[in-house]
Amino acid sequence: MRPNPVNSSSDSHARPTARTEPATLGARVWLTPESRVDGLFGGIRLYLSRQSQSMSRYIVEQSVLTALGWVPTVLGIAARGLIYRLILRMEGLAAIENGVRIRFAGNVRLGHGAYLDQGVYLHACPNGIEIGAGSLVMHGSVLHVYNYRQMPHSGIRIGRQTLIGEYNVIRGQGGVVLGDRVYTSPMVQIIAVNHVFDDPARPFTEQGITAEGIVIEDDVWIGSGSVILDGVHIGKGSVVAAGAVVTKDVPAHSVVAGVPARVIKQIGTEKAGRQTEETVDFSKVTSASPEAATADKEDSTGEERIGSRPAGVTLSIVIPALNEEEGISDIITRVQDIRADLKQAGIENLEILVVDDGSTDGTARIASTFDSVRVIRHPSNRGYGAAIKTGFANACGDWLAFLDADSTYPPELFAKLCRTAVQEKADVVVGSRRSGADTQMPLVRRIGNVLWSTLVSYIGKKRILDPASGMRIVRRSALPRLYPLPDGLNFTPVMSTRAVHEGLNVIEVPIPYHERSGRSKLRVVQDGTRFLKTIVWTALEYNPVRILGTFGLLGLGIAGLVGVSLVALRLQGVTELGPWGAFSVFAALVLAVAGVSTFALGITFNYLTGLLHHGPVPLPRHITVFGRPIDHQFGWLGAVIFLGGVSLAVTSLALALQGWEISRLWLWLLGSALFTLVGLQLFISWVLMRVMEALNDRPVRVTDEMRLQFGEYREPSLEASRQ
């Protein structure tokens, strides 16, 4: 079987035929045992040949990746967006998070608006990896060409506006082509290579490989855990159900499911309904494994789930569980009992998902005894946040909720949270343990929660009383603005921080809280430190000046106090400084220069944040000079301060030439250095800010001028822009 290339007659962004066509049917590369590696240097040469095109490129690429690859948040994204152009091909602006590994960077091409999340690994030898404009590769995904067997059509080509979900693996030895707007859910595998094992007398490693290639056309959705094998062509607009193993071509606008995958539906031939990854009736496909059969349970009404979600609003409650066999039965029973209350709140359907996060006890077995519960298992412990995200990825509800499995939170109040969400038109409703209801939270954690609450409220300029609450509901449509979220226990404070900065409507509802029996999985010092770090770094992605500006103004304030003290001492007749006085003067110099630099850097990065997010720039408008924001005054302020510093230096030099001793002049020289450096920093920052402000305002100005010249003007659509 040979997949046909994507039809490019009406698509100007189609890939060249030589690259989109897979290798010839059954093409095999017969291998001989690899040449022996003689000695240490031979091993090093072999290793380097797998890393880059040449020794010089290896040195350059690794130097750049090592220097900038670890820098987190928007600061690192900005630096990598500028400097990584030296080692890879980048069209426009692309965002690369920290921790991204790249080999053969010269063979990587990123389109405008492409995004590489943390933990992504790209190996682009030899024919390269292309990621189209606006496409996202989420954390933990591996795009791996790694072709040293001269397969003629190797490479990975990803179209525009495509999403590669978490922990995907794409092997491109035979060539992989993904069209536009292809969405792959977590843990999908697309493998364009296969081993030959025809001869039982020879090891399969000596029998070669086949690599026919894989083509996935536009607007395809691939469900969680699916596997796409070599030689497959998936037609436009198709859906691959979760867990399917696709071994044959898929016609356009089809739904396939099962192991091996078969067509179970033609899209458009039945009444339109929302297809979800976990609601396909696998009993109509083929005999599958016992694990796959668990997706064929009946809900509490006795009706089978067969492809479209139930009518009415659905609430999906995710219960992450790790070794909770003592309490999982009780919490499931309590959640099941809230159906009547939910109906009164306008929620017609309830979906319960238990995500077993690598438990070593009977948690999953006990949860599986409940007919109305879907159990999803992680083979190993991946973390609290990872379990919730797995639940979200497999849920079908309009509203997504979660709570702990240890009965510390009251599921009976989900109806109240849902009612509040509807009445307040909220995006996120948090069950707050600090809003007046009875709470049994331990003192140490209560203190920590006050700290996180104060920090999130200050940084986000919105009062949040319980940013770490583990009971909340989220509108499904808000998820793209909340992601990415971490895998650990810091999932909830990062969600709160991101929700506030994204401008989502966050409402807190008082709930009681009961401390769990037994040992808590929360480690106060270690997890508290992680909470602090992730809250700060997340805020830096949106409003750096709120944090950097605070530290900058603090440094300037201390320097100002030292300066006022010096003037006061001089007025009192003091003409000499002791050791502490001299140290204070030099400390004031450092703090003043560092304070101005940090404050200016914060504002500069806010402009950059607005540019990358294509949104308004949050700036400290409450700090004004002559009625205008202070960043607009940096130009003339910097020039005046700089000239003052130069004048003071020239005056001090003239006095020294007239015989003044250095003991009388050193303080003035120190002051001249301070004013010169501060003034220069302000002026440079002003120039940079004006350039970034112009870039940020350019789309609006273009639209306004086009409207003036041509009347009603509309932004060109995605399809029109490709013609």
Image (cartoon, rainbow, N blue to C red):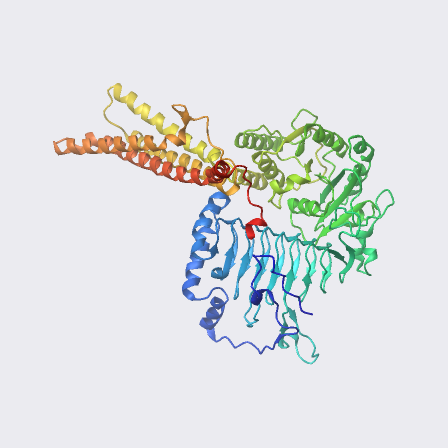
Percent across and percent down for residue 353 are: 75, 45
Establish if 714 lies above or below 357: above
- In the rendered image, the residue lying farthest to the top is 572
Q: On the picture, is 346 further left or further right than 186?
A: right
- In the rendered image, the residue lying farthest to the left is 658
- What is the quadrant of residue 246 in the picture? bottom right
Establish if 246 lies above or below 325: below
Residue depicted at 63% across the width and 64% down the height: 5
Q: On the picture, is 295 further left or further right than 99?
A: right
Residue depicted at 56% across the width and 52% down the height: 722
Percent across and percent down for residue 192 are: 63, 65
Closest to the observer, 416 or 364? 416
Residue depicted at 54% across the width and 58% down the height: 130
Establish if 53 lies above or below 74: below
Percent across and percent down for residue 127 are: 53, 65
Establish if 108 lies above or below 68: below
Quarter that holds the N terminus = bottom right
Closest to the observer, 266 or 174? 266
- What is the quadrant of residue 397 in the picture? top right
Percent across and percent down for residue 536 are: 52, 38
- Is residue 291 in view? no
